């Protein structure tokens, strides 16, 4: 839309500069030069490309032409063959033209590709039978050719796509076979022709498009292509390297000396890789267990675990998961708090804390009371809200066991191991301070924390006691629900307490396992199976060891009338039903495990049991064992050690030596033994009180006035014992009650016992000496 350029016209010069009319714009003529001159302005490279492009075009035209000829030739050959069978005249004509055409076509092809191999289907044999006809019909073919060429390239171009012609070609298989496929030929040529330079390959698009692109765009395209190729090559190279990679060399003992943590980590990775495809990467002379041992050692060094705990973890997790667990356990879990719904709502608490500069969020959809704290400008244990009891700092996993317990308003609930009262206060909040919550803990010092927390959080429905949980069934029973958050090794909370990694041993695990079993049986015994609302026991630990979890539950399933029920928690990993060579009850899949690497909370275990009968199943064997145990150990005992036993045998003393209280006294008759047992039982049952029930009538100790009365009493007590669910328990713990019943402390009693034993021993020695002297 500019002014029109006029090259001839010259602007007239006026008198003054201002009066002068502005002339049309002048352009250098070169810019509008005709296209022929373009090559003058082209760069060398462009010229080359243009030449190539033109050459290609002409070649393509030639090839098309050739192709058309060949098609025609084929047709004619067909016609010739058919005619030769019938009309001879026609045959001659067609044959000639076909031969000639064919020869020409072949010549053209040979000319075009002098160095290329010849057409597959054409041989000297068929040349012989084609030659005579060629001479006769050459003229006719020439005319035909000319006609065809004149008819324009349109027909010719459409020929390859013409289905009819294609059909004709393909129908006569012999012809195709004898003459070779012309399509094949042209294909070959095409292939050869397209063997272009790298540059050409860089631009697979046709030349026109290439010319449309700016140089920078072309460069960019090339660069991208090259990059893609390089990436591909690099990938292949990497794969090759991985395949040919040196197999990890198992270290010799001498190499162990000066390894840095980085070296250890590298070796952990290497061994992991070997173990991931053991057959491929192993050293033939090394077994899997050797690699596992090496890995264990390295993991212990790198993550500061003792070998015992590391091997336990290796038993629990597959290798890939083990690494995740170990890594996650090195990082502290997010700080979380629980809203005390007895005093506030989570929304209000969150608002109050945000106002104080606390950055927080709801803990998750699974809880309505939890908040996660990202950061805080003030210590969370000293805010006015904390002091007012609006919240308690509590790990996310701690909420799970109370959620599984699902306390109901107005129920009688026991929190058997309560200190410091986190879960206990949560129970009270869910119960809305109704019913009765018994918070017990065996640790006197820790129980103070329960008192303080309950006071701060406004828990008013609780009775706090300090008793051994194992003995609770003798104090109180008949609870609707019991939470047993058992003492454990704490292997789930290593991020909180890293000392666990290096201090826990097999003895600790065994000790916990024993206590946990006892506590769980006690908890079950304290639960009322006939509770209208409950009859549930929730067992939880912050340990991930199966010994402290599945094993304990499996034991309880065998020993009491309980079954596992779903925890009601909609996340968490199923508990083990198999662990190494051990098999647990299949219902253990209803229990739930929580891991730091999977759930971003401390390692935790939750199981929910339902008690379906208040009777305690006792196997015949157990009964027999207990009876023997009671009779043998409670009243008379054998020599305390093998050494003493040896001495006794030397003295030919066949009777078991009475120790302790019965030492030096005549043997008790069966009747008397029964009486003694009865006495212990009666004394024991007087401590058993059912919650919200009148204390059971305690009987005065029996004084066997006469034999008849005694016998009668024994029979009655026998019957009662058989009915009583506490039968085995009373018997087991009767021994422990003896000193208490006698009004002595256990320590004092034991001391006296020892003294008596020593005296007895001295006495024996003395008599032995005297005998030998005599
Ligand atoms: C894991 S803690 C309980 C934590 C508590 N449930 C809470 O959420 O705050 C285990 C508790 O069991 C107590 N304990 C250990 N042996 C016990 C026993 N034989 N009887 C009762 N409690 C015992 C310990 O003193 C300890 O406070």
Image (cartoon, grey):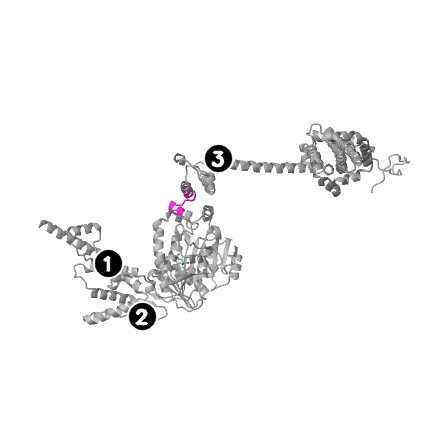
Kindly check if marks 2 and 3 are in contact, taking CB atoms under 8 A apart as contact.
no
- CA distance for labels 2 and 3: 79 Å
Q: In the drawing, what numbered circle is on residue 416?
A: none
Foreground residue among 726 and 468: 726
Looking at the rendered image, the disc whose residue lies closer to the viewer, 1 or 3, is 3
Label 1 to label 2, Cα distance in Å?
29 Å
Which is the main secondary structure of the residues drawn in magenta? helix
Q: Is residue 619 left or right of residue 351?
A: left
Counting other residues with Cα less than 10 Å from the Cα at mark 3, is it few (<14), some (14-19), or many (20 or more)? Answer: few
Q: Is residue 225 left or right of residue 101?
A: left
Query: Can residue 707 be seen from the camera position used here?
Result: yes
Number of other residues with Cα within 10 Å of mark 2, as a class: few under 14, some 14 to 19, many 20 or more: few
Q: Quadrant of the N terminus?
A: top right
* Residue 180, percent from left and from top: 70, 35
| Location of mark 1 (residue) | 633
Q: Earlier in the sequence, mark 1 or mark 2?
A: 1
Residue ID for mark 2: 696
Label 2 CB less than 8 angstroms from ligand 1 = no
Secondary structure under the numbered disc 2 in the rendered image: loop
In the rendered image, which residue does mark 3 sit on?
Answer: 246
Asked whether residue 376 appears in the rendered view, the answer is no
The magenta segment is 295-311
């Amino acid at each position: 839309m500019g002014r029109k350029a006029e090259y001839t016209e010259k602007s007239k010069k006026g008198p003054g500069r201002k009066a002068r009319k502005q002339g049309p714009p002048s352009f250098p003529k070169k810019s509008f030069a005709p296209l022929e001159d373009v090559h003058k302005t082209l760069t060398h490279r462009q010229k080359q490309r243009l030449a190539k492009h033109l050459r290609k075009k002409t070649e393509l035209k030639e090839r098309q032409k050739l192709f058309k000829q060949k098609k025609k030739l084929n047709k004619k050959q067909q016609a010739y063959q058919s005619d030769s069978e019938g009309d001879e005249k026609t045959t001659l004509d067609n044959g000639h033209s076909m031969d000639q055409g064919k020869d020409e076509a072949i010549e053209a092809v040979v000319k075009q590709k002098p160095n290329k191999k010849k057409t597959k289907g054409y041989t000297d044999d068929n040349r012989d039978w084609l030659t005579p006809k060629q001479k006769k019909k050459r003229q006719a073919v020439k005319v035909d050719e000319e006609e065809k060429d004149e008819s324009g390239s349109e027909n010719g171009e459409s020929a390859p796509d013409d289905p009819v012609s294609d059909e004709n070609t393909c129908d006569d298989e012999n012809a195709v076979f004898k003459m070779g496929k012309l399509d094949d030929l042209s294909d070959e040529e095409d292939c050869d022709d397209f063997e272009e330079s790298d540059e050409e390959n860089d631009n697979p698009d046709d030349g026109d498009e290439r010319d449309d692109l700016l140089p920078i765009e072309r460069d960019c395209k090339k660069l991208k292509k090259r990059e893609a190729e390089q990436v591909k090559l690099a990938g292949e190279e990497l794969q090759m390297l991985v395949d040919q990679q040196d197999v990890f060399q198992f270290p010799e003992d001498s190499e162990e000396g000066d390894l840095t943590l980085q070296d250890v980590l590298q070796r952990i990775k290497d061994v992991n890789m070997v173990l991931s495809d053991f057959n491929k990467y192993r050293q033939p002379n090394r077994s899997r267990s050797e690699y596992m041992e090496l890995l264990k050692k390295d993991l212990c060094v790198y993550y500061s675990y003792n070998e015992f705990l590391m091997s336990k973890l290796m038993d629990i997790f597959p290798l890939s998961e083990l690494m995740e667990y170990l890594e996650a356990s090195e990082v502290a879990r997010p700080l979380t708090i629980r809203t005390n719904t007895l005093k506030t709502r989570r929304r209000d608490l969150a608002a109050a804390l945000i106002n104080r500069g606390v950055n927080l969020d709801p803990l998750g959809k699974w809880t309505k009371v939890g908040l996660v704290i990202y950061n805080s400008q003030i210590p969370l244990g000293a805010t006015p809200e904390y002091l007012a009891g609006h919240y308690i700092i509590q790990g996310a996993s701690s909420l799970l066991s109370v959620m599984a317990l699902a306390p109901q308003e107005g129920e009688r609930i026991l929190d058997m191991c309560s200190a410091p009262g986190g879960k206990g206060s949560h129970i009270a909040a869910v119960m809305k301070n109704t019913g009765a919550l018994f918070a017990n803990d065996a640790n006197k010092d820790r129980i103070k924390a329960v008192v303080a927390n309950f006071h701060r959080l406004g828990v008013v429905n609780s009775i706090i006691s300090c008793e051994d949980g194992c003995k609770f069934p003798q104090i109180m029973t008949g609870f609707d629900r019991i939470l047993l958050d058992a003492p454990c090794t704490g292997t789930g909370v290593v991020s909180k307490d890293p000392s666990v990694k290096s201090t826990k041993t097999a003895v600790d695990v065994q000790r916990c396992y024993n206590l946990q079993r006892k506590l769980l049986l006690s908890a079950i015994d304290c639960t009322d199976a006939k509770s209208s609302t409950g009859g549930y026991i929730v067992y939880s630990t912050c340990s991930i060891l199966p010994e402290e979890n599945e094993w304990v539950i499996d034991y309880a399933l065998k020993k009491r009338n309980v079954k596992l029920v779903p925890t009601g928690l909609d996340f968490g990993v199923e508990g083990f039903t198999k662990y190494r060579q051990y098999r647990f009850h299949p219902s253990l899949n209803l229990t739930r495990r929580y891991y730091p690497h999977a759930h971003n909370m401390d390692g935790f275990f939750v199981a929910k049991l339902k008690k379906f009968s208040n009777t305690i199943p006792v196997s015949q064997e157990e009964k027999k064992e207990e009876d023997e145990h009671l009779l043998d150990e409670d009243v008379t005992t054998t020599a305390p050690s093998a050494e003493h036993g040896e001495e006794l045998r030397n003295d030919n003393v066949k009777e078991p030596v009475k120790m302790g209280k019965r030492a030096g006294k005549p043997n008790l008759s069966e009747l008397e033994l029964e009486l003694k047992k009865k006495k212990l039982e009666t004394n024991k049952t007087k401590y058993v009180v059912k919650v919200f029930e009148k204390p059971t009538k305690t009987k005065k100790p029996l004084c066997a006035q006469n034999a008849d009365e005694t016998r009668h009493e024994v029979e009655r007590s026998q019957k009662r014992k058989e009915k009583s669910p506490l039968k085995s328990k009373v018997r087991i713990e009767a021994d422990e009650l003896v000193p208490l019943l006698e009004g002595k402390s256990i320590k004092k009693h034991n001391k006296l016992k020892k003294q008596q034993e020593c005296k007895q021993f001295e006495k024996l020695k003395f008599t032995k000496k005297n005998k030998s002297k005599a």
